[in-house]
């Protein structure tokens, strides 16, 4: 077999490697001390199962790199998914949103409430401990994550049988002939991005009970041997939970359902419903201001650039006027000088 000439950014050198070798094999030869979890091939993220057939610039990455962390977290989620399927075969794992300490997860029944909100199974501390023990067992076995390409029909049938309706919506909206599916211990799932080569690298994690579910904790940035500290920031968690419930009420729990709504021409209805829910929130805040009008004189709105602070202040002022107040809106944007006068 002929050799392929590659450039490895980690060692700053050109190397000849055998045609058809995987990135995993190349990493073990060139820089085994780097503990690679994935690689950037010509600046595109690839799993270590990627086969080298031509010249490339390659940079092997580990948990210190943002894409390396995301690869670790995706792989950890797959391990959790497999354990939940084993312990709760009649239920569904929902990895709902990010928390300051990790990912918020719920075990859900297959049927929703009448208003569309998920029917959550209230997991116990003992069950969370069992989940963690079973995850540790899978990780200790160092099982491989195996990627296969299957047809659309096979993928649709597979995820329909597993009651993963959001993934079915996504498959339908992407309209591809084939899809990459990962297998772990014979069980399948899909992910937006590559996974680690095997479970053995996922040694640092924890599960902590949180609200109606639990938090999946993964390693800290810059300290891969320790999990993120648990921060129970109730206001942030409440806002995220409310947003999740809004998505359920609107019938859009994922990108697949959103794509389906757009393709069916119903996006205007979705926008109007979202605006109505948002306006109710402004009215609620205005009610709180009105109830404290004897002591509250100034309301501050904070947020990053272009997050809607000015728009929010104007809409909130309208709701306050409905209650008989006469608010004055002071926009921070008015503080800035014209562009030509900016140093």
Image (cartoon, grey):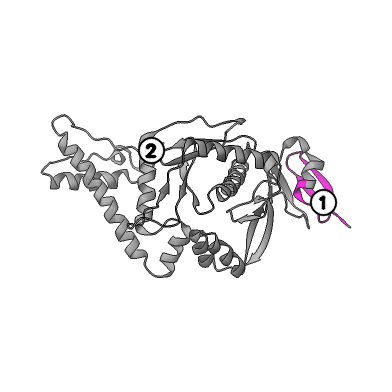
How packed mark 1 is, by other alpha carbons closer than 10 Å (few <14, some 14-19, many 20 or more), is some
The residue at the point 27 percent across, 35 percent down is 300
Mark with earlier residue (2, 1): 1
Residue range of the region highlighted in magenta in the rendering:
2-24
Label annotation for residue 155: none
Position of residue 111 relative to residue 228, above or below, is below
The residue at the point 21 percent across, 47 percent down is 283
Residue 324, image x, y percentages: 10, 43
Q: Nearer the viewer, residue 39 or 157?
A: 157
Name the residue carrying label 2.
236
The local secondary structure at tag 1 comes to: strand
Q: Nearer the viewer, residue 279 or 95?
A: 95
**Separation of marks 2 and 1 at Cα, in angstroms:** 50 Å
The residue at the point 57 percent across, 38 percent down is 132
Would you say residue 61 is visible in this rendering? no
The residue at the point 41 percent across, 39 percent down is 211
Name the residue carrying label 1.
5
Position of residue 331 relative to residue 248, above or below, is above
């Amino acid at each position: 077999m002929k050799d392929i000439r590659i450039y490895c950014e980690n060692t700053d050198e050109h190397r000849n490697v055998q045609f058809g070798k995987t990135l995993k094999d190349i990493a073990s030869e060139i820089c085994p001390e780097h503990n690679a979890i994935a690689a950037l091939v010509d600046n595109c993220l690839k799993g270590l199962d990627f086969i080298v057939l031509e010249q490339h610039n390659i940079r092997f990455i580990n948990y210190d790199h943002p894409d390396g962390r995301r690869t670790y977290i995706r792989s950890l989620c797959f391990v959790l998914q497999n354990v939940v399927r084993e312990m709760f075969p009649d239920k569904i794992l929902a990895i709902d949103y990010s928390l300051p300490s990790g990912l918020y997860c719920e075990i859900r029944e297959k049927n929703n409430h009448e208003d569309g909100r998920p029917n959550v199974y209230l997991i116990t501390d003992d069950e969370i401990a069992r989940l963690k023990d079973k995850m540790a067992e899978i990780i200790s076995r160092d099982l491989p994550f195996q990627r296969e390409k299957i047809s659309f029909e096979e993928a649709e049938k597979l995820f329909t049988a597993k009651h993963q309706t959001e993934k079915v919506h996504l498959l339908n909206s992407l309209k591809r002939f084939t899809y990459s599916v990962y297998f772990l211990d014979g069980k399948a799932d899909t992910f937006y991005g590559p996974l680690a080569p095997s479970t053995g690298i996922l040694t640092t994690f924890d599960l902590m009970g949180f609200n109606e579910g639990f938090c999946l904790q993964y390693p800290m940035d810059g300290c891969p041997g320790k999990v993120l500290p648990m921060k129970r920031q109730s206001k942030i968690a409440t806002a995220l939970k409310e947003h999740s419930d809004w998505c359920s009420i609107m019938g859009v729990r994922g990108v697949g359902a959103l794509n389906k709504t757009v393709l069916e021409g119903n996006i205007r209805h979705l926008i109007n419903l979202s605006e109505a829910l948002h306006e109710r929130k402004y009215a609620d805040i205005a009610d709180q201001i009105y109830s404290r009008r004897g002591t509250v004189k100034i309301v501050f709105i904070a947020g990053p650039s272009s997050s809607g602070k000015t728009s929010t202040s104007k809409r909130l002022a309208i709701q306050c006027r409905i209650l008989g107040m006469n608010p004055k809106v002071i926009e921070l944007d008015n503080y800035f000088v014209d562009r030509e006068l900016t140093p």
